[in-house]
Amino acid sequence: MIGQVLDKNTGAGVPGASVVSADRAGEGATSAATPDDPALGDGFYWFVSTLTGPHPVNATKLLYEGSTAKPDITADKVTTADVELGAGRLSVTPSGIAKTVAASPPPAP
């Protein structure tokens, strides 16, 4: 099993995410940065799965919403399962900002 964990908002790779088989404890990996291979994006992961057929793969990382991919794993072949993790985004469009400051008395002479 190979794949890439991506930020759902930006499409950027997410290193450090946990990617695990939902049906087989102990099968999984942690996504990584790939600075030495420009052809391989950040957030790359791989692990060997002993399962075949449709089996969910869960991806999680702190500050992200978890996500599940549902690849159909084929024996003796590489199965790809990319996963997107959602993260909160704050968007502010102010029409104006107001602030009131109390006046200080003038300094004593």
Image: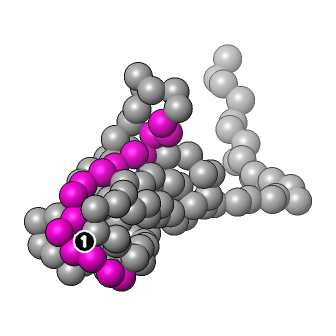
- The stretch of residues the image draws in magenta is 40-54
Q: Nearer the viewer, residue 66 or 30?
A: 30
Q: Quadrant of residue 106?
A: top right
Q: Secondary structure at mark 1?
A: strand
Q: Is residue 14 above or below residue 70?
A: above
User: Outermost residue, left direction?
Assistant: 26
User: Outermost residue, right direction?
Assistant: 95
Q: Main secondary structure of the magenta part?
A: loop
Q: Amino acid at mark 1?
A: Ser
Residue drawn at (80%, 54%), measured in percent from left and top? 97
Residue drawn at (34%, 49%), measured in percent from left and top? 45
Instruction: Identify the residue under disc 1.
Output: 21
Residue drawn at (17%, 64%), measured in percent from left and top? 27
Q: Nearer the viewer, residue 13 or 103?
A: 13
- Tell me, yes or no, whether the highlighted magenta stretch contains residue 52: yes
- Measuring from the top left, give residue 65's x and y in whole percent: 43, 69
Residue drawn at (81%, 59%), measured in percent from left and top? 93
Q: Is residue 109 left or right of residue 26?
A: right
- Tell me, yes or no, whether the highlighted magenta stretch contains residue 82: no
- Measuring from the top left, give residue 48's x and y in whole percent: 21, 58
Q: Quadrant of residue 52?
A: bottom left
